Image (tube, coloured by chain):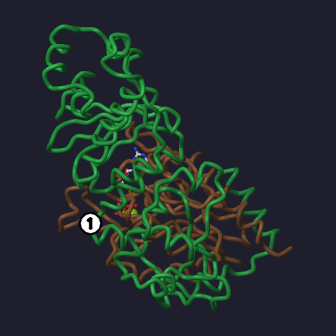
Chain colours: A brown, B green
Amino acid sequence: MQTVKMVVTGPFNAGKTEFIRSVSEIEVVATERRITDHTSRIKKETTVAMDFGRITVDSDLVLYLFGTPGQKRFDFMWEILSEGMLGFVVLVDSVRPETFREARRILDVFHNYAHTPYVVAANKQDVQDAWSPEDLRIALKVRPDIKMLPCVATDKESVKNVLLELLYRIMETAPE
Amino acid sequence: MALKGNLRDFSTTQLLNLIHLARKTGSLTIQVPAGVTTLYFREGKLVYASTGSRDGHLASVLARAGKLTEEQAKIIRTRSGTTADKELGMLLISAGHVTQQDIVLSVRGDVLDTVYGLFTWSDGIFHFEPNQLPSDDAITVPIDLENIILEGSRRVKEWERLQDELPNLNVALKFTDRPQAQLRNINLSVDEWRVISYINPRNSIKQIAQRIGMDDFQIRKIIYGLLQAGLVEMVEPEGAPPRRPPSTAMQEIVSGPPAVKRSVIRKLIDRIKRL
Ligand SMILES: Nc1nc2c(ncn2[C@@H]2O[C@H](COP(=O)(O)OP(=O)(O)OP(=O)(O)O)[C@@H](O)[C@H]2O)c(=O)[nH]1
Ligand SMILES: [Mg+2]
């Protein structure tokens, strides 16, 4: 049996867990923890190790979705999560400009080093104060050759669209 | 679609850059401790500004620019009542008090003073309202944002912000090929020109700094301005050896994705479509 994997990354609270939950056939997290530091004002639970979702294609092929932990001190997890991935999604919290700097930091790393296909998703587009994907592209300096997609992580169709766009990108570089 | 936030997270210069590149029309309201300022834009050009902290009456604007005396301005303000600026301008021109040129330059100067006043604030909430323009009887003077962005960048004092925008001095620069980015319309300082003359995909920022004897802060500040104004963009230096990733965590990404066959990707696509 073949397993393939894709990674969902992005700043704290961007919606990574929600994104994977919307399409996974299994319960996504066993790793949420209550937050005890100052970030607890933003949310009660954060992902401390990783999210883990699964989509079974057939008896020979399974796709795993991994979500990176939101807080910076878990950066080392990248090493484990990114190994052998097909591509990844960078989720941005379109509602909270205070996370844009961190989103840029993540994107910078990939602009400079990544040879792995990825797309950027402007999440929480259903919220009234959300910045538009076009504005976010400029604000986050996303290059013109990288797809910038609107996203609502709680909406399955929206998540499917992001994953499909990523797969189309992966397809371009895949061998026959 | 909103554009809201705090200058702590997205600075005035960054906002102007966004409005410039997206050629936005609308009003940007910024609330700082000194008061509320509203800037108006049409297709990415600044056309008008109003601020609570100064009197925007045309007579006052002309007095501040030295085109009317304080005494004259005072009389005009009381006599003109609710006369709109455009009409009042006409009256002043036909009465021979000022020329049209005086008015345009004075309003322009006042708008610039207002914007430059914003650059001193690094904290304050902002909010952009699309398509909102000043009233028809206001005197609007379209001003290109490139020069304003450059001026704002010259006034940046925080090292962290520059570090953030330009973490790596080993990259090179090239001129953007956007048609709007025309150097001749831009007022550059001598130091900026010196940097510009070395811009070339073969020279890293660090090399340019060494060549002209600037420290990291000086060169960062200048390049930050050029980047913000959309005049240059970062590129990998030509002929440089491939860059090492910052940590082993990125090794895997550099080595690229595993070679998964197209037929497999196609199956994944079909499956996700059916979800
Ligand atoms: N309205 C709206 N809320 C969303 C959306 N996506 C996520 N959320 C909410 O945003 C909050 C954060 O979502 P999570 O999925 O926990 O974010 P995360 O990226 O996994 O967070 P960490 O693991 O702590 O970094 C939750 O309250 C979600 O319900 C969205 O598209 N729209
Ligand atoms: Mg999470």
Pointer 1 residue: B157
Q: Looking at mark 1, is its residue's CB closer than 8 Å to ligand 1?
A: no
Q: Quadrant of the C terminus of chain A?
A: bottom right
The one nearer the camera, B198 or A174, is B198
Determine the quadrant in which ligand 2 lies: bottom left
Chain to which the residue tagged by mark 1 belongs:
B
**The N terminus of chain A, quarter of image:** bottom right
The reply, left or right, for residue B239 in relation to residue B98 is right
Residue B186's spot in the image, x, y percent?
50, 53
Q: Amino acid at mark 1?
A: Lys
- Point out residue A83 in the picture as x, y percentages from the top left corner: 57, 83
Q: Is residue A51 visible?
A: no
Q: Nearer the viewer, residue A2 or B36?
A: B36
At 75% across and 80% down in the image, what residue appears?
Answer: B259
Relative to the observer, which residue lies in front, B234 or B210?
B210
The percent position of residue A175, horizontal first and vertical second, equals 82, 76
Q: Give the side of residue B81 with respect to residue B94, left or right.
A: left
Q: Where is A80 relative to A23, above or below?
A: below
- For the point 75% across and 56% down, the residue is B270
Kindly tell me whether residue A122 is visible in this rendering. Answer: yes
Q: Residue at x 58, y 85 (%)?
A: B252
> Measuring 33% from the left and 38% from the top, which residue is drawn there?
B109
- Residue B120 spot, x, y in % from top left: 23, 53
